[in-house]
Image: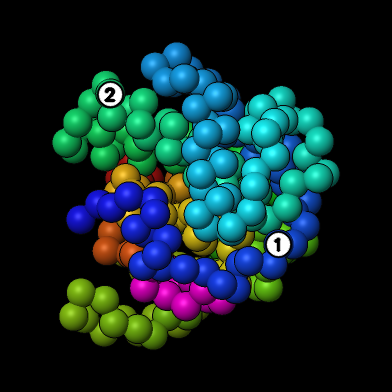
Amino acid sequence: MLSSLSVAVTQHPYPEFQKWWPVGETFLAMMAEAIICEWRPLAASTDGIASVQETVGEYISLVYQRKARPDLAASFAASSDLNTIQSGEFDALSYGFFHSAFKSLASQQSGNELETARRRFAEQVGSRFFGLLAGILATDLPDSLNTASDFAAVDSALRQVGKFLCKQGYLHSFFDFRFDVSTYHAGEKIDQSKEDFLPKLTAGGTAYALYEMGRPVILPSAVYLYRTVGEAQHHSSRTIEELFSRVGCDAWETDDFDPSNYPSDRVVELWQIRRRSQDL
C-alpha cells in the first residue's frame, strides 16, 4: 500500500545517512545529463524545476532535518556547482526528479501501462548513464556473451563500473557483482558456481548473479519512491542492466525485490540473466 513521504520516512528512518559525504563531480555530471535528458520532455505536464525544488526541499527537511539550498534543483539541471553537492542532496535530487517524472507519467497512463512507462523511464536514464560511463572507462565489451573470453570481458567491465561508483561516492563502501550464487528464491534453492554461469546462459536457460552494494547513496530515496509511488530509480542496477543489454542479454533483479527489507549498510539483489531469444 502506498503512503505519503512523511509516513514512509517515519516508518523507515535512515540514521546512518544523516552524516553526508562527498559525491564525485564526474558521476554527478553524467547523472545530471542522463536524468535531465529523460525528464525534460515530461516536465511540460508538471510545474518544471520549481515543482522539483519544492519536492527536494520537503525531502531534505523530512529525511535529513536540514534546509535545502533554494537553487539546488536548478543548479543540478544546469550541471553547475556540481562539486558542492553532497550525498544527501543527490539523494533528494534523485527523488525529486524521478517523483516529478513518475507523476507526469501518471497523468498520461494508468495500470500496467503506467508501471511499464515508469520502469522504462528508469531504464532510459540507466542507458544514457552507461553510454557516458563506457566512454570514460573505455570498456571493451564483446557483441555477445558466448565464450569464456566474452565472459571475462563482461566481468572486467562490471568491476570497472563498481570501482568507479565507489570512487565517486555513489557507493559508500563496496561493490560486489558475483556469479557464484547459493540462496533461495520463490521456494527453490539456487546453487550456481561461477563456472556454471556461461553453460547455463549459452544453453538458453536462466543464469543468476548476486549484486551487493555497500550503502548506496540513494537507498533512502529508493525506498521512499517505492513506498510513495511503487517504483524506484535504482541507478546502478539500471546501469548494469544496460551493460548486459549491450552483450545481447536481458538482465534484471527479481521482481519481488523490496529494498526496504535490507539493512542500510548492505543492499542485496538476486539477478536473473538470459540471452535474448534472437541470440539463442
What is the quadrant of the N terminus in the image?
bottom left
What residue is shown at x 45% (from left), y 55% (from top)? 222
What scheme was used to colour the molecule?
Answer: rainbow
Is residue 97 a member of the stretch shown in magenta? Answer: no
- In the picture shown, does residue 39 fall above or below 176? above
The location of residue 133, given as percent across then percent down, is: 69, 43
User: Which residues fall within the magenta stretch?
Assistant: 260-271
Secondary element type, mark 2: loop
Is residue 266 a member of the stretch shown in magenta? Answer: yes
Secondary element type, mark 1: loop
Is the C-beta separation of discs 2 and 1 under 8 Å? no
Q: Residues within 10 Å of mark 2 (few under 14, many from 20)?
A: few
Q: Residues within 10 Å of mark 1 (few under 14, many from 20)?
A: some
- In the picture shown, does residue 102 fall above or below 226? above
Q: Where is mark 2, residue-wise?
A: 107
Q: Quadrant of residue 258?
A: bottom left
On the rendered structure, is 28 left or right of 280? Answer: right
- In the picture shown, does residue 250 fall above or below 34? below
What residue is shown at x 67% (from left), y 34% (from top)? 70
Query: Of residues 187 and 71, which is closer to you in this image?
Result: 71
Discs 2/1, front? 1
**Which residue sits furthest top?**
44
- In this view of the protein, can residue 239 be seen by the observer? no
**What residue type is disc 2 on?**
Ser
For residue 195, which numbered disc appears in the image?
A: none
**What residue type is disc 1 on?**
Trp
Q: Quadrant of residue 216?
A: bottom right
- In this view of the protein, can residue 119 be seen by the observer? yes
For residue 20, which numbered disc appears in the image?
A: 1
The location of residue 123, given as percent across then percent down, is: 45, 40
